[in-house]
Amino acid sequence: IAGAFVLVNFDNSEAADGTPKMMTFVIEGNFRVHYDCTFMDKTKKTDKEEQVQKIEFHPEYIVLFGQTHNGRVIPVHAIKELTWEQS
């Protein structure tokens, strides 16, 4: 049985322009995630695929949680490509 759970959490504080801050967007389920990142020094590059159970989207970073609940933080500014599909 495949399923996904989505949670959006809004902070009660406001951004500089007066709009509410979006804190997290979460999807849970079994996902195959592919991501390609390039970092500022351009010597580090990743092109990976992982099985994850939860993806948390934050304004400055994304966290991928594996089957053992370990997490990988990916800075948004480094992402060239990020895709996921249910598996």
Image (cartoon, grey):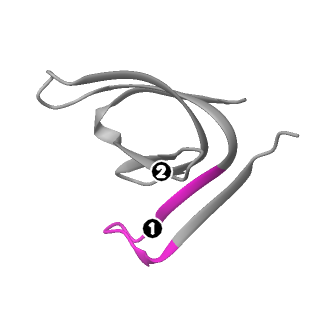
Front residue of this view, candidates 18 and 53: 53
Q: Quadrant of residue 74?
A: top left
Q: What stretch is highlighted in magenta?
A: 11-27
Q: Residue 70 carries which label?
A: 2
Say if 69 sits above or below 41 in the image.
Answer: below
In the rendered image, the vertical position of residue 71 relative to residue 76, given as above or below: below
- Place of residue 65 in the rendered image (x, y in percent of width and height, measured from the top left): 52, 48
- The amino acid at mark 2 is Asn
In this view, the mark in front (1 or 2): 2
Which residue does the numbered mark 1 point to in the structure image?
19
> Could you tell me which residue is drawn at 65 percent across and 35 percent down?
31
Q: Give the Cα distance between marks 1 and 2.
A: 33 Å
> Is residue 85 a member of the stretch shown in magenta?
no
- Residue 68: where, in percent of width, then height? 56, 49
Circle 1 crowding by C-alpha within 10 Å: few under 14, some 14–19, many from 20:
few
Is residue 49 depicted above or below 22 in this figure? Answer: above
Residue 76 at what x, y percent from top left? 35, 41
Residue furthest out toward the front: 68
Going by the numbered disc 1, the residue's amino acid type is Thr
Residue at 72%, 29% in the rendered image: 87
Label 1: which secondary element: loop
Dividing the picture into quadrants, the one containing residue 75 is top left
